[in-house]
Image: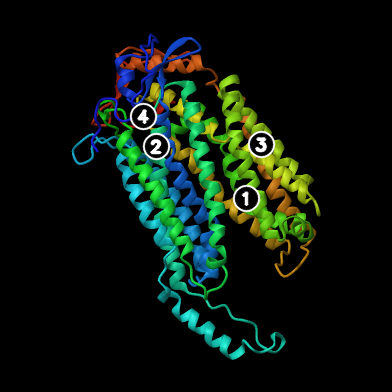
Amino acid sequence: MEQKTGEGPCVDMKAMPSTTSVESEFTKESYPMAKSGIRDGKPYFGRLPFCTKFVWSFPMFGYFALKYMKTGYMKKFYSDDYPRASLSVMAAFLVFSTLLDIFFDPMFARWTDSTRRCFGKDQGRRRPFLLVSGIMVVVLFPLSYSPPATLSETAQSDFEAWNATWGSTAEADRPATPSFTSVSSAVWFGVFHILVNVITVSMREISSDALGAELTPDFTERTSLWAQWELWGVLGILVGLIVPTLGEAECASSAETGCTSYLLLALAFGLIFFISNTALVAIVRERPTSQLGEEFTPLVPTIIQSVNNYPFFLLMLSDVVEGFGGTLPMMVLPWVTEYVVGHEACEEIAGSTGMFFAYCVILHMVVRLPMTFVWKFAADRFGKLKVFWAYNFLYGLQMLAFLSIGPGAGYLCLALAGTWGMSYAGHWLARDITSDVLDYDELISNQRREGQFMMVLDLIPKICEVPAEAMPIMLMGYFGYNPDLAQQPEAVIWVVRLCFSLLPGLAGLFGALVLLRFPLKTKDQHLQILRGIEMHKEGKSAIDPLTGLELPVLSYGEDGSVTYGAQKLQGDHNAILQ
């Protein structure tokens, strides 16, 4: 697995000599997968062959299929089929895993950023973790669907005994049916949920996103790369949500049927992911770690420094759209279809509220897929920052439009689910812009910290998930929600509508407002950043294109000292970056 020089399997027959000022030997060595090319009649460096983009992005198909099959079906399988898992114990594990994830992600991100050798050789900073996470995915996801039947044997036998005694008795004459659940099955769920969501998912996503951010230095080529990432991801989500319905009757109907369909699908999706992920590790090469030096910055100061990166700080603030805008609407959508649109309208269109909910989700994803091309075209034509601002603004208006939904408005709800997919299809531009901000971070800090920055970009939504998942349920309970009522109190309905529409809409508009202050606006600014990095590598001072300030070379000593131009300081160097 050691990184080799040379072209590798993705041989580029279109590569051309480049005359751009950013293609120095240092730049070519830093981006070994990037090639020379011509755009608009001008040579440039940073073009990625289709093979490279495909090899890096295609594993998202199998990975997202597994991830969203787990999100959509696993909890119901554990509660309704033979595991008979205790919901309260499952809920405790879900909360604990989210909190654990918030602590694990920063530690792992710094681990992968500061990796220099693996078994004494330069294997890259991401590829070893991608290989390990690929093995963990193909093993742990199927095991999650395989709790031993013996774990719920007592609960099952108790139910059978009760059913033998009271099953033939009229409902009015028998006592209320007890809940026969298994704590052991819930613990199995919780342990594998932590192994998958906290360790495996974090290892895979942070490593993959960080690798994508350093494949090319070209401002425009990154947009194409991340758009392809989004396409395979959406296709994976669609497959992960739709295909398991073929086995839903077997796997989520009763505790007597048993279930093998989910296990077989997890094995199939896992195999697709494992093969493509192994090809990624084998083909894609990273920059030599000899370019990076050693990093001695402690974890907490490193996170503080990422906040002190002003462009990234603004991206973090705008990322509340992903936190509240992505999580909260999906969280309350089942209640929107059942109590806001209403049973009658849902059953008239889809036969049941559950199927109407599925129609909304599938329509959202189907529309989102082709709209990715539209957002990419707009980013290439008008500039990624302007288009990302438009995404935040339009997403805010789109979510506010859901306030117009009322009883009987089934077709309006479906139409808005489609336009929701149209607007949300541009969310991947945040990663594209973050890739450019990482170059600015290298200019001002002389460090490459793709893992930590991409981690923070995902950490904001994870932090938002806690209140986003708890707030609707708490407010609904406070205002008198009762699942036995066919019509909920008006206050409960307004809680659902506001959580689905108003809060995500305001988050989108807030993101658009914040981005008005974003300083890294143009491709020319990014080109100046790349040139400044090269000047630093030559031992020369550079000009910060965003502030106009002179930036002397910044270097770090093994004793914790920091050399900034002619100054050598001891201890915390965070003040320098400020």
Along the viewing direction, whichever of 437 and 249 lies nearer the viewer: 249
Q: Residue 291 carries which label?
A: none
Contact, mark 1 vs mark 3 (Cβ under 8 Å): no
Instruction: Assign a secondary structure to mark 1.
Output: helix
Relative height, residue 382 to residue 414 (above, below) = above
* Nearer to the camera, 191 or 356: 356
Classify 10 Å Cα crowding around label 1: few (below 14), some (14-19), many (20 and above): some
Of residues 486 and 372, which is closer to you in this image? 372
Residue beneath disc 1 = 330
Nearer the viewer's eye, disc 4 or disc 1?
1
Q: What element carries label 2?
A: helix
Q: How far apart are marks 2 and 1 (CA)?
A: 28 Å
Please name which of the two marks, 2 or 1, marks the residue nearer to the observer.
1
Could you give the CA–CA distance between mark 3 and mark 2, rounded to whole angstroms? 28 Å
Residue 451 disc label:
2
* Marks 1/3: CA–CA distance: 15 Å
* Quadrant assignment, res 188: bottom left
Point out which mark residue 448 bears: 4
Q: How far apart are marks 4 and 1 (CA)?
A: 35 Å
Seen from the viewer's position, the closer of residues 278 and 130 is 278
Marks 4 and 3, the one that precedes in the sequence:
3
Alpha carbons under labels 4 and 3: distance apart: 32 Å
**Disc 3 and disc 2 in contact, CB within 8 angstroms:** no
Quadrant of the image containing the C terminus? top left
**Residue 152, image x, y percentages:** 45, 76
Disc 2 packing (10 Å; few <14; some 14–19; many ≥20): many
Res 292 quadrant in image: top left
Residue type, mark 2 in image: Gly
Question: What residue do we see at 71% from left, 67% from top?
Answer: 482
The residue that mark 3 highlights is 395
* Amino acid tagged 1: Met
